[in-house]
Image (tube, rainbow, N blue to C red):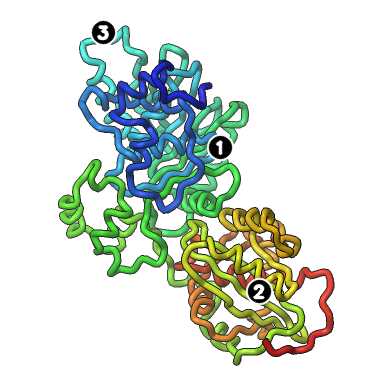
Amino acid sequence: MVTAGFENDVTPLARRLQDFLPESWDQIRDSGIRPLYVSNLSDDAEGRAEFLEGAELLGLRETGMTLHPQQLMIADVVNSGEETVVVEVPRRSSKTTSILATLLGRCLRRRRYKVTFSAQSGTKSAEFFREWIADLELHQGGTPQDQWPFTVRKQTGSMQLTFRNGSVFRMLNTPTAKALRGGAADVVWFDEAQEFDAELSAELKAGALPLMDTRDDAQLILSGTAGEFRAGWLWDTLEQGRNGDAGVAILEYAAPDGTTNEDINDEALWCRVHPGIGTLTTLEKMRSRRGAFADPEWSREYMGLWPVSADSAVIPSHVWEAAAVARLPYPQSVAFGFDVSPNGSSAAIVAAWRVDGVAYVELIAHEPGSTWVRDRIAALATKYKAPVGFDPIGTNKVVQEELQRARSAAKSRLRPVERGGVSPSCVTFLRDLEDGKLHHFGQEGLTAAAAFAAKRVWGDGTSWAWGRVASGGDITPLVAATMALRAYDQSASRPKLHAIVM
């Protein structure tokens, strides 16, 4: 597979790209609005050529339609090579068509490639299939049917496309584990996956994953818009992608958490969030649509916002308020923790220590961006000879690598809290708070983070951590405080505490 040097004047793939696109692939893809979250993007030439061939099969080139930045972004995320791909894009952004083009192109160019597709119901799957077949048949022009690159089976319950090279694109009659049993698949794709509740999600996962067991480079693709509840397969996988979990590729166009009901009427925000405006729809049409939707529906369908339930808060306000005390000086032994939000928009540093077993946490800094974290942490760790705790994922990992490259004693004081320690860290923090053994100094940023905080549960439901995505706002100060307390508690030795004046 060609992976480099394709955009030149000599390779066949380059000529195909130049025939189809007015500018280079990367120029077009990167000219659009920036997603809220996006993982590593593929630059694989063969994958891009497959997308273009699928788009041509759908008639996009023949009808003179322009390929838009978000479509190329979707193709590069799907081609990332990760086993799981999650795509959340607002309505009218060509999400489904772009994924379809990629998979049709694979079916055309790969032998015996097998795709299994389902929407939220058998009725919706059949509706999608009939629309796709109408487009595919229309754009065969005057070519005799026996020369088409595919044959069509349209009977309800057994709808599929079969390609001359043995590839198959089949539709599930109903999205159930039973319908998924048997055979194998290179790709299992669920569209409108936000409609699957937690129970159906578990059932579908149990049925879909075994289809991929015997296929090299098999993929699961979940796509949709924001749902009514922060639960289900799409939400769980979206959260994994936002948190930078291994094996998950993500593309999400959405307004940031914390967007208010007043904000959702800001047309400037619409243009920053919705990639279809100016490409597939217009601002005038969006204004018209806004009048037809209540706030919750508009937030989900066009702003990508998942609602935060009233009972999602983990830390009751009265418990947090009761833990506030007057500012105390640092003891001789202290630890620091830092955290950067998954999209790098903000970061926080917190100090933590204990006196007679009672924990204290103080917010040191909470500022936009993350480039300032390295130097600030290095100075604090060196001055106080203190350990530094952090969750080594995403931009936190970048800060760690920056500190390790720097000529600073701080790098020897880094204490990454690995996956097995994150849940116990959060449990300890919350338990101490509830038992009256953790205090804070009433600082605004940390208090707001505590009010926002929600849980992210995994495994059998007994393991949990602060849910960066499930929370209703920025929780970096709370995560930093938790990591600081963990670093303090895990320190190999702590001298007897004597209060000192800073």
Residue at which label 1 appears: 83
What residue is at 37 percent from the left and 41 percent from the top? Answer: 30
Q: Residue furthest front?
A: 407
Q: Is residue 199 visible?
A: no
Pinpoint residue 320: horizontal percent, then vertical percent. 56, 83
The foreground one among 2 and 405 is: 405
Residue at which label 2 appears: 429
Q: Amino acid at mark 1?
A: Glu
* SS type, badge 3: loop
Task: Answer above or below: position of 90 versus 187.
Answer: below
Calculate the distance from the C-alpha at mark 2 to the C-alpha at mark 3. 70 Å
Q: Amino acid at mark 2?
A: Phe
Q: Residue furthest bottom?
A: 326
What residue is at 42 percent from the left and 28 percent from the top? Answer: 48
Calculate the distance from the C-alpha at mark 1 to the C-alpha at mark 3. 38 Å
The foreground one among 45 and 468 is: 45
Q: Is residue 239 visible?
A: yes
> Dot 2: few (<14), some (14–19), or many (≥20) neighbours within 10 Å?
many
> Dot 1: few (<14), some (14–19), or many (≥20) neighbours within 10 Å?
some
Identify the mark at residue 181; answer none if there is no mark: none
* SS type, badge 2: helix
Identify the mark at residue 144; answer none if there is no mark: 3
2 and 3 marks in contact (CB < 8 Å): no
* SS type, badge 1: loop
State the quadrant of the C terminus. Answer: bottom right
- Left/right placement of residue 155 relative to residue 491 reads left
